[in-house]
Image (cartoon, helix red, strand yellow):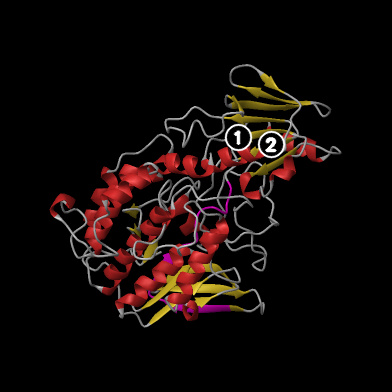
Amino acid sequence: MGSITAATPFPRAIKRVAVIGAGIGGLISAKSLKDEGYFDKIKVFDRNTCSGGTWIYSANYGIKTPIPNIKPQYGPPQDPSKVPASAIYSNLHTNLPIDVMCLRNRPFIEATPEFPGHESVLDYIRRFEKDENLMDLVQYNTNVTEAEYKDNEWLITYFNIATGKTSVDAFDALIVANGHYYDPFIPDIKGLKSYKELEQQRDNGIKIIHSREYREPQEFNGKNVLVVGNSASANDVAREALTTATKVYQSIRASTLPPLDPNSVSQVAKIPEIKEFLHDGQSSSIKLIDGNNLTNIDCIVFATGYLFSLPFLTRSEGEKLITDGQRVHNLYRHLFYINNPTLAFIGLPIRIVPFPISQSQSKVIARCWSGKTQLPTRQEMEDWHNMQPRSERPRDDFVFGAEKEFQYLDRLNMWAEGHHPDDDVNHWSSSDPETGEISSRYKDRRTKALDLRRAALGY
């Protein structure tokens, strides 16, 4: 991939933009680009048959997850016609109230519950696509198999799933909005690989899955279930398993991060981190770090998060950007690739409100590429990147939480309105419905989201 100098951040005027993904991140990017009235060509590629991305529910998971799974995908898929289902489970409800979750200038329809199910969120996304006349910009049933930067342009190779035809198109810039909830991370705990292989050979062996494959609590009927992890999905799976399972355990690893909600699953037996999986070919057990052993488990669900994955980039470029999949490297403001800012990313931070974050990010990208606002120099971007604190766990650098999110949003919006992103946010004010300051009510509701959810849903 070519490197862009500080004096000329873009090698040519950016008039043709490709977007990978037609979830909310890709669609709001298309709208922001369209709103500029500057770009000659905007094309969104999505491998599904319709918009929605992560929020498209399927009762069947389809592609199975390797166990363990610690490395991201590189290179084109072996079969580009196969599309994995999303991680949505049947009874999923949002963790955020709709007035916090929505795009800033577009509320959910009036009849929507405060904490809706996935069907309402998908309906919201598709209404947005239709109302903003974005459908003609999206090419569905299209799997991007390679994105290569060559001779100062992006060559996008894509496979049409309906026709089986492969094509190539050229663009000046690329927005990656493919999400990060489809390449599961399953840690390589000692003994896990052989434990899995031996169980596969047994009749009615222990079922081992990632939470991405979970759909209904009936899967656990009469079983002893172990959920590994302490994320929102881990707590949801454990809570739902209680309705059908005989016994539910939840293994929680000591972490520098506080749990999302330590009281959300009160009846689950909380146990410490797993040290080793033991199996002699006949019987099995799970050794914990406190020395105790867990036996008689029928199903293990790893709710251990996801890897950042960019399978459409060439292996050499993908490895530069994501290495082990725990973070995306060398980005300015979690947004622009410093080595080549014709490549930008939507929605990478974790524990955020994705819709308004994506909205602000897309405004910055569109306006930097159209020239309405300025991208900092290469040196300024590198200086910012080098000053950022680094966590022992690389993924933690992408974990925000409410306060960091508020600061990030205000700085993005200030930048979108023409200010330098390093300017003092306290000297900026704006009431623009899309890029203005976020309200104190929004901050309060965002901060209290888990309490509001418990009051509304009982968990």
Specify whether 294 is left or right of 274. right
Q: Which residues make up the magenta segment?
A: 167-184
Mark 2 / mark 1, whichever is N-terminal: 1
Q: Point out the image quarter for the N terminus.
A: bottom left
- Residue at which label 1 appears: 228
Number of other residues with Cα within 10 Å of mark 1, as a class: few under 14, some 14 to 19, many 20 or more: many
- Residue at which label 2 appears: 300
Q: Are marks 2 and 1 in contact (CB under 8 Å)?
A: yes
Q: Quadrant of residue 35?
A: bottom left
Q: Position of residue 187 (x, y in %)?
A: 59, 38
Q: Residue drawn 39% across and 55% down? A: 99
Residue 321 is at least partly visible in this image:
yes
Q: Quadrant of residue 357?
A: bottom left
Q: Residue drawn 16% across and 56% down? A: 428
Q: How many marks?
A: 2
Amino acid carrying mark 1 in the image = Val
Specify whether 370 is left or right of 25. left
Q: From the viewer's perspective, is residue 31 above or below residue 450?
A: below
Q: Quadrant of residue 301?
A: top right
Specify whether 166 is left or right of 95. right
**Residue most toward the top?**
291
Q: Residue drawn 27% across and 68% down? A: 368
Residue 14 is at least partly visible in this image:
no
Q: Is residue 174 magenta?
A: yes
Specify whether 158 is left or right of 321. right
